[in-house]
Amino acid sequence: MSSSQCLRNMYFAYSEGDIALAQQNALDAAKIALQKAESAAPESPQRSKYAKRAQIALDLADRLKQHKRILSDQDVIAWQSSLIRGMPYYPTRMISDAPACFDQLSIPSDSEHETHKPLPLKKRQYREPVALYSDPSGLLSMSRAQKKHLGRWIRPGATQSSLHFPGKEYFQLVQDLSNDCSFVAALSAFSYHIHMHPDMYKYGILESLIRPSSAKGKFYVRLLLNGAWRIVTVDNQLPLGVHKRALHVASPSHPLLYAAALVEKAILKILGGYDSPGSSAAMDAYTMSGWIPEQISLTDAKLSASKLQEFILKARDRNVIMCAGTGNVSDYEASVYKLAANHDYSVFDVRMHDNELYLLLRNPWSEENATESTPRIARDDQLLAKPDDPRTFWISYSSFMMYFAFFYINWSPRNFTHAAHFHVANKYTLSTSPPKSYLSKTQVQLSLTDTNEPQEVWILCVKHYETIPDTFNSTSMALAVFDSPNVCYSPQDAYMLVEPMFSNSYSVLHRVTIAPDKPATILPVFTSSEPVARAIDSSIAPEELRATISVYTVSGKVALKQARKRFEHSKTVNGRWSYSNAKSEADIFLQSPQYYLELAAESDLDLVLEATPSEAMVRIALYAAEEKRLDEIPDASSELISSGSYEEGLAVCRGRRLAAGRYIAVPAAAVGTDFASFALTIIGDAQEAVSGFTKALPRGAGMTKYTFDGTEFILQAFRSCTVEIYAIATDTHVTDVSIAAALADRTVATARSARSVAHIQFNVESETKYYIMAAGQVTVEVYSSDDIRIYND
């Protein structure tokens, strides 16, 4: 193992919280680097290079020993996202550190990924290979139909001279038995775009993506994965089909163009193999280039065809590539119009002709996969020029809207003057319904500076490849944008600039206008219809899913940072409701846990109650209190703030300028809730008040409980003790109750209430009979500090 590999392992171990392993990897890196330095010639660059690396590794080991940070929170998430399908793909550059990759698309230069310098474009000389490299992860999986047509695996060449690059020249690409039409469409669109605008780019698309590591059949492909530029290593073994069927992407115009097949292999390695269903043309283009993906559903009922036409014409004049995809095509349409179902096409050009918009499409299928390469809905018009490619055809906008389901566009970041990026990890909701509460989720504050006017900001959110394919596709993602600078507790907490619309797409893109003095808050939300399992071990159910947020603007500067709560201090307590035989609001109130709060000075605070399951109907209220517990339902004047009526899953109340004093918070669930758990969070501006927020002692704490269904009974103690007696209304509509205790000759204690609960407390003498009488439709609860006997006369 090399020293650089040890350092990468160190960063990954650190991101996973294994400090001991990270420190050991740092020491191993230092040891290997010192050995390399000692074996190098004196005064040589190699000796200096490895000596410097050894010192860096020792410094990192020392920082780890002292429990000091070696990665920022953002870099930790990027490194945590290195495992894809159980294989590590460590970052070589963070997305924010590589703006050149948007257009020049350079790649780290050496096999160790030790530097961030672009690879020299001049040819390098290698010795003849001793052994050919084979990917230790094995051959990529194939479907049964693909295996039927598989002849053998071949190596088209291991030397750089066999890795043919067409430069900026357009190259035709076709698919046959592979399922990755999205990749072929995206790469073809890039090839045509660069061919049409050669002065805008320094390199061709393939030169920017792949480089050989040596003459041993080992290649590095640089891709944007999980918020960072990462290297995917592949060998040059490609499947050769029988009967001239192609099992990988091929080029009729450039038969020696194996580089495209190796890039395809790298992407399919990430997606799961040659039998992978693929993703979308927009996401494949993003993975190759970092160009901003956008997917437009042409079947959306809210979509305006005229506005989309205007949008497409404006996009044509900017630095973009475009693709399109069909949806479910009927057998009749497939037969008559020669369109493939769920198939992606490249869009090479858009042009107005005879007052109608036409799109120049290219079908990536080979002749073996279609009896007619040009659909019958295409316009055969020589006035509209097209490339010398039999798979291209012009189609009218009206026909396009009729038979296609998706329009994909990737925008070059060169269109924008400033960008910012932020990684998030949020818990997902195991439900097909959106979560009720946003409090526990990471939220990102977006701010705009260096401008005096409101500006349009593009917000892109891309979820990370982390889970096994089945559960990945079951997860949905949405993006909410609030007109608020702070953490929002719920969808109703602030005005939404963007309302969350859930889909299982890899990415979402929104455009919002924000003012320089009004930051917004971005929240990515995940749901899943089934428990998520990571690819490395399907038995591990992660609590969080990760995504990368990127924002772009053409004027001013944008910045992203984690959003803060409205107040600096917060504390969360967890509890459960267990309403045994609760029949009324009085039962609910008395059986609900209570939390004591004391304010030394005027304060602001929020109370947020989150319930599990989220279907539970809940509310939260704060009462003024003299004691540390409320044993009777307080009157309306004592309820200072509340969340109002019962709400599903979440209740929020806010107190502003609360006076110094004692308070009791009561979280409650509605009648009919037998068992549910909750998290109650207090967020305030006073540290002392928040830290002192504690659970009040339950009713009758330390005492024995007795329940009596009748309204009259005798209570007798064996020894002197203290008792508390509650008369609790069993009918929500009957609130007038009373309770009394008497000896044969006098009344000991009495209480009457119009608020559903009456309560008395007194001392009991041993062997003395006390006559207890209650009035109203009630249940009587007795709490005693010693054993007592309850019976009818």
Image (tube, rainbow, N blue to C red):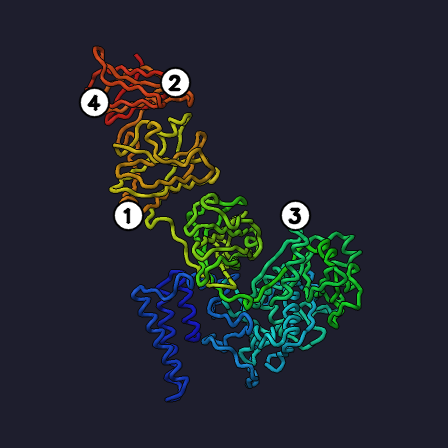
Mark 3 nearby-residue class (10 Å; few <14, some 14–19, many ≥20): few
Q: Amino acid at mark 2?
A: Gln
> Gap in Å between the C-alphas at discs 2 and 4?
26 Å
- For image coordinates 60% across by 73% down, the residue present is 205
Closer to viewer: mark 2 or mark 4? 2
Quarter of the picture containing the C terminus is top left
**Could you tell which of marks 2 and 1 lies nearer the N-terminus?**
1
Mark 2: secondary structure? loop
Q: Amino acid at mark 1?
A: Gln
Q: List the residue tagged with mark 4.
A: 763
Q: List the residue tagged with mark 1.
A: 687
Q: Is residue 489 visible?
A: yes
Q: Amino acid at mark 4?
A: Asn
Mark 2–mark 1 CB contact (< 8 Å): no
Mark 3–mark 1 CB contact (< 8 Å): no
Mark 1 nearby-residue class (10 Å; few <14, some 14–19, many ≥20): few
Image x and y of residue 268, in percent: 60, 65
Mark 1: secondary structure? helix
Location of residue 287 by image quarter: bottom right
Q: Is residue 268 visible?
A: no
Label of residue 301 in the image: 3
> Gap in Å between the C-alphas at discs 3 and 1?
51 Å
Image x and y of residue 27, in percent: 35, 72
- Up-down: is 791 above or below 409? above
Label of residue 14 in the image: none
